[in-house]
């Protein structure tokens, strides 16, 4: 818990990382296309800007995952997708710069075999909400039932001391963050943003969008009176019901993303 | 009032529902075109996003109504409009997925012969305002005089218990919601959104847009000092006056919707 | 001060008003073009939407003024500009619908020979700010120095009673509103919006834009601590200095308006 | 500290200023192109509108700097860039109007040899935040670590008295402002905006964008509870880490700026 403990691992934090291992049998084109689209949808919906990233577990080798090279999500193409192993080492990076925080993804995929997609972002209501002490992200409408399972705040000072750059830039910090995912599908990161997980890519995107909207609503009504949040039972019922409808926003977001990019 | 009472009816909640009855004499093309346009205008004005829906009573058979298939309103076309009976069963669905909450529409049309159009939405100021206890949507400017007749909050727990998914997904809940429309033309739905009715489609759209704007204003000024709301007499005078002007915004919204969709 | 006194004048409030008098020698094409542009700029900057209007005094006959027919400002063209006399009667309306509130313009032009342009709008920070009692629009940055001369609130109940539709729909109410312009160039209208005047059209547009921005700022910081507003001397110095720079925003707004409309 | 002391210098405040000295060997085309791009990026990100300006130190003659002529930043082209000396006199102005506040730039370049770029703006969260007494801009997320070195407020009344137009319109005021830059890279200007400096143009733009975002966050969460700001050590670590990543937003902003302008 001292300030340099955040750098104790031997993982390189540098952005250009030598390839390790052999590329897997190619990930399905459909998965790669969907991951590219997820990047665009998250940008179009204001969840990511020049920063933030989204990954998907490899559909052939579950000990690998796919993530864009170090670039703004809004312009990612299929050629920008790199395969990584669970040590967050690229296997087909060919020298391209990678995200410093790829350990968020690798350690969650290692710890949680059920997770298939991870979104890390600095969305504009989540960041401020996450720095208010004694304030929690809680579901106040049916689209955000998944928040009923909790939205704990990752305080990096507990793991890296008072002098980190807030980034989850090594295995140790990635492990600490990953350990905070239990029933919950989101962890807020104090002074930084959030990470969202799901068992499908579409659902991870959906949850990142609606966590942000719910956070905005909470900021708007704080101080106006007592708030009626969803009960645990309502939250669970909403997850079961509403998350069965996400093909609808996905189809629409896809259509908009393609029109904006003239595909 | 127990948590499973929300599912007591025999209405199927599933999205694919067998057609019932015979299609009516075709609804007027003008009505269908106007309903398509209403979908687009509501999207363009931020009242609906990937969710929310708008319906119109059939112009030949008043025991039928028109509503899009289960899809995002912003891309609805005439081919997506389905005719429903007052049991919320499609008559020409041909297996297409339908909205879970079509009972909002059917039960209002059944209970209120004067209502010709219904908008259900989750607009971004109405949702948070609706979860603040002891807080009411009240008209603070002339464009929202229709709020002077009241804007009660539908608490689904009173009808479906503490464990619903917040959705008005059957006849029983639809009836309960419909019963809350008396003089008022809007009902807020706690943790969910709102439903707006009117005797014309243009007016329902207009009211949905301006209810949202009025809600935003109320959120902005809460806590700043005492607010001067419209008197009941002012509200009524505003309805009589301003709602005679809605061809103006409608024409403009139509022009914008068509330009955006390059028609 | 009774509720029907608002209708005591013989002016017709109806929207279709017979032409009176003879058209003036044609207003300069440059003035008409600038008025059309002012409509577009006010729309593009969010000051007007489907409602609101802007007028200019006739450049040949100072007892006449120019104002669009009853339509949304964002699509006004030169053919939509109508000439009015100071009784708010169109002289070349040819049966086209006119704004109910044209008396705002006529009575200000009658009372204030120095005023050359009038903007009436319902902009989105001015409306809510105007309904908070004991709250004033005051200049907090250099672009809004003109607010230093005051921003009184027109309470229509003082002139039309508690049951008006909030609209300045006749000469009597127009006169009452016009009388509130002294040193100040803006009057807020409770539950309605505001009216802004200036000795040039460009300046009236500029002031309407920046009054709205200043109002937004005030709403944002209320309750955060004591605010440092401009001193009267600073306000005056800002008017003298900054309002000499308005060709710059005007040129830019013009360029944007033309690009958006592909001229 | 009297109100006219702000005009004591012999510098002309007028906008058309005679050229002084000889043009330098031409500034590099790359620098000019990057400065044009910086103008566009600042506009696209809402930091400047019709007002505000960005300059860069001349890459051949460090006693000169480059700044657009008096115009809106969003439409600046290479032909609009003028070279100035450290007395804020244009050397190749050829009679074109120049910014009244060019002294902000000249005096900072004179006082701080390490500074290579200066952004002056009136961005929409910085202005209101800056007028709240006893309120400071402080870093609450990792992208704004540079705020950890301080964000003092320039009170022009301390140098120009209670009757200025708030503008830094002469050498004396420019010197006073420049003297407030020590470790900090931003100075807020009460009732006006802010000025940001950096050792590269990209970094100055980055900081202006993220200072605005951090200010918006602070306005959103004030009053909601105790805020966890970055520690001084975290701020410093964030500067070292995150500001090594700014090529990523720059590349993306550049791509967007070019697409919007069809280059």
Image (tube, coloured by chain):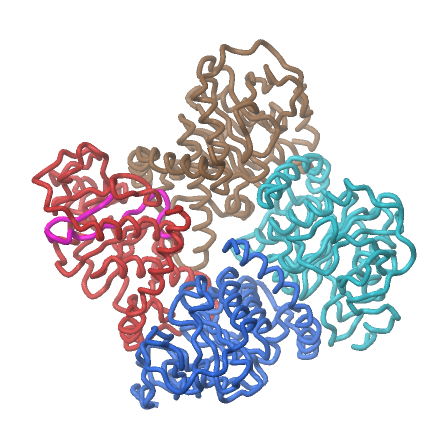
Chain colours: A brown, B red, C blue, D cyan
Q: Is residue A71 above or below residue C207?
A: above
Camera-side residue of A105 and D177: D177
- Residue at image position (75%, 71%) is D157
Q: Is residue D166 above or below residue A162?
A: below
Q: Is residue B57 magenta?
A: yes
| Residue B95 falls in image quadrant | top left
Q: Is residue B165 magenta?
A: no
Q: Is residue A36 above or below residue C43?
A: above
| Residue A225 falls in image quadrant | bottom left
Circle count: 0
Camera-side residue of C113 and C218: C113
Q: Looking at this view, name the residue that lies furthest to the front.
A: C25
- Residue at image position (67%, 16%) is A18
> Does A129 sit left or right of A95 as displayed?
left
Q: Is residue D130 above or below residue C185?
A: above
Camera-side residue of C54 and C217: C54
- Residue at image position (49%, 47%) is A135
| Residue A233 falls in image quadrant | top left
Q: Looking at this view, name the residue that lies furthest to the left.
A: B21
Q: Is residue A34 visible?
A: yes
Start and end of the magenta stretch?
B47-68
Image coordinates for residue D124, horizontal then vertical, percent: 60, 58
Image coordinates for residue C98, horizontal then vertical, percent: 37, 75
Image coordinates for residue C32, horizontal then vertical, percent: 51, 72
> Does B111 sit left or right of D2 as displayed?
left
Image coordinates for residue D241, horizontal then vertical, percent: 70, 35
Q: Is residue B227 visible?
A: no
Camera-side residue of C47 and D199: C47
- Residue at image position (53%, 27%) is A77
């Amino acid at each position: 818990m001292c300030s340099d403990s955040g750098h104790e691992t031997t993982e390189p934090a540098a952005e250009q990382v030598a390839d390790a291992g052999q590329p897997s049998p190619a990930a399905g084109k459909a998965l790669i296309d969907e991951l590219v689209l997820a990047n665009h949808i998250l940008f179009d919906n204001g969840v990511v800007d020049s920063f933030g990233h989204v990954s998907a577990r490899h559909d052939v080798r579950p000990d690998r995952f796919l993530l864009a090279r170090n670039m703004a999500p809004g312009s990612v193409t299929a050629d920008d997708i790199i395969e990584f192993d669970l040590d967050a080492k690229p296997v087909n990076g060919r020298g391209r710069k990678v995200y410093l925080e790829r350990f968020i993804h690798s350690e969650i995929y290692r710890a949680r075999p059920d997770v298939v997609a991870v979104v890390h972002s600095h969305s504009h209501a989540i960041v401020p909400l996450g720095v208010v002490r004694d304030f929690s992200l809680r579901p106040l409408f049916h689209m955000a039932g998944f928040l009923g399972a909790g939205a704990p705040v990752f305080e990096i000072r507990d793991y890296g001391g008072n002098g980190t750059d807030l980034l989850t830039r090594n295995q140790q910090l990635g492990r600490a963050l990953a350990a905070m995912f239990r029933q919950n599908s989101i962890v807020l990161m104090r002074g930084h943003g959030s990470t969202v997980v799901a068992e499908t890519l579409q659902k991870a995107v959906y949850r990142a969008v609606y966590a942000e909207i719910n956070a905005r609503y909470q900021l708007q009504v704080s101080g106006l009176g007592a708030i009626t949040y969803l009960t645990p039972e309502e939250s669970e019922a909403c997850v079961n019901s509403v998350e069965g409808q996400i093909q609808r926003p996905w189809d629409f977001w896809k259509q908009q993303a393609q029109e904006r990019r003239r595909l």
